[in-house]
């Protein structure tokens, strides 16, 4: 274990039964001591065979990628990425008591990047002020806050503007930066995406490199059009034979419908869309969003999460994850 990242060594010790170390390493305590299973079920083959602690398992995979693929990365940059990966998923975990404390503090636990960033910032207050490296912490906080958003922008789930805090941070610190920010961003996103699926990483590697270049260069005018965003949200259905071009033309020739969707999508970020809706037809997909539009305030809505639907829609049939659309909407 001599060559492993310190984080991987700590995880191995905890899994081997040495829970004393959890008192010293809060990130690991939160990931380890939890009954939560907040995980995207899209890549899960069987619910029954889901890892006992899937979030810790995912974090361990991301750290292993960092350890394996970036041995030559400068130590200071590797330390930043390691710290981001350790903290970026903590809002998905924690004991019931700790999660209730976080809620009382107003931490956003349903939007995990925001919640995890707040938890990280709160925990840094325990570090003696004289020992803190505030510029480094501020970068780590901002990277946690924007963690995963490059991949979600590629999928059409979030707007590019959600990356503005990171772009603004880079712009305001450009003259004093000691690190190669483009290199950090690309390595970090490699770990995040390949941790989900090596196949997905190979598919989006080039686009990820392009987007991280935009971020590092301070570019902001990179939003997807409504049509392109919808195309990306329907990618799984398109791969199964859906004629997206014809369906888009058919439905969005209705100017009122087009106007409503433009308003909704220019103001909102949408989580777990493909995970929950890929088995619905394009028409059903649109009707679900129209229901959401009617049930929320279109003037103030900013975040829509299909995570509860994703969790309800899947069940195991003969040892394999299946979809039960009827039971979800029977009521």
Image (cartoon, grey):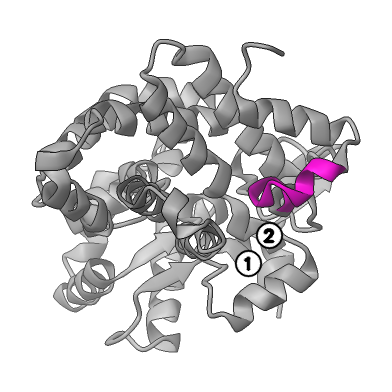
How many badges with numbers are in the image? 2
Which image quadrant is residue 17 in?
top right
At x 17% / y 32%, what residue is drawn? Answer: 213
Q: Secondary structure at mark 1?
A: helix
The reply, left or right, for residue 118 in relation to residue 183 is: right
The reply, left or right, for residue 95 in relation to residue 177 is: right
Any mark on residue 308, and which?
1
The reply, left or right, for residue 138 in relation to residue 324 is: left
Front residue of 165/255: it is 165
Any mark on residue 311, and which?
2
At x 48% / y 50%, what residue is drawn? Answer: 274
Q: Is 25 one of the magenta-colored residues?
A: yes
Relative vertical location of residue 279 with respect to residue 67 in this rendering, above or below: below
Label 1 crowd (10 A; few <14 / some 14-19 / many >=20): few
> Which x, y percent locates residue 259?
17, 75
Front residue of 141/293: it is 141
- Which residues make up the magenta segment? 20-29
Relative vertical location of residue 50 with respect to residue 16 in this rendering, above or below: below
* Labelled pair 2, 1 in contact (Cβ < 8 Å): yes
Any mark on residue 161, and which?
none
Q: Is 90 one of the magenta-colored residues?
A: no
Front residue of 302/83: it is 83
Q: Main secondary structure of the magenta part?
A: helix
Image quarter where the C terminus lies is bottom right
> Which x, y percent locates residue 78?
43, 26
> Which x, y percent locates residue 179?
25, 30
> Which x, y percent locates residue 71?
46, 12
How far separated are the C-alphas under marks 2 and 1?
5 Å
Which image quadrant is residue 180 in?
top left
């Amino acid at each position: 274990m001599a060559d492993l990242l310190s984080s991987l060594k700590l995880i191995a010790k905890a899994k081997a039964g040495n829970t004393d170390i959890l008192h010293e390493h809060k990130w690991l305590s939160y990931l380890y001591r939890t009954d939560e299973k907040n995980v995207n079920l899209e890549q899960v083959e069987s619910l029954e065979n889901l890892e006992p602690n899937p979030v810790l398992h995912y974090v361990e995979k991301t750290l292993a990628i960092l350890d394996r693929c970036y041995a030559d990365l400068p130590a200071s940059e590797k330390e930043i990425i390691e710290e981001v990966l350790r903290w970026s998923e903590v809002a998905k975990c924690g004991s019931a008591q700790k999660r209730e404390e976080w809620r009382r503090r107003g931490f956003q636990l349903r939007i995990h990047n925001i919640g995890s960033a707040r938890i990280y910032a709160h925990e840094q207050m325990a570090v003696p002020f004289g020992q803190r490296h505030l510029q480094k912490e501020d970068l780590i906080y901002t990277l946690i806050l924007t963690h995963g958003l490059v991949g979600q922008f590629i999928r059409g789930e979030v707007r590019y503007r959600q990356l503005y805090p990171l772009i603004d941070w880079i712009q305001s610190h450009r003259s004093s930066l000691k690190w190669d920010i483009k290199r950090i961003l690309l390595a970090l996103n490699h770990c995040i995406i390949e941790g989900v699926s090596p196949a997905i990483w190979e598919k989006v590697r080039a686009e990820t490199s392009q987007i991280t270049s935009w971020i590092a260069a301070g570019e902001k005018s990179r939003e997807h059009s409504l049509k392109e965003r919808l195309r990306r949200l329907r990618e799984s259905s398109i791969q199964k034979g859906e004629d997206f071009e014809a369906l888009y033309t058919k439905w969005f020739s209705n100017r009122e419908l087009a106007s409503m969707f433009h308003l909704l999508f220019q103001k909102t970020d949408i989580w777990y869309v493909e995970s929950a809706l890929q088995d619905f037809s394009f028409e059903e997909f649109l009707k679900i969003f129209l229901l959401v539009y009617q049930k929320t305030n279109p003037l103030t809505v900013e975040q829509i999460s299909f995570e509860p639907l994703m969790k309800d829609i899947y069940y195991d049939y003969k040892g394999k994850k299946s979809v039960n659309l009827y039971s979800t909407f029977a009521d």
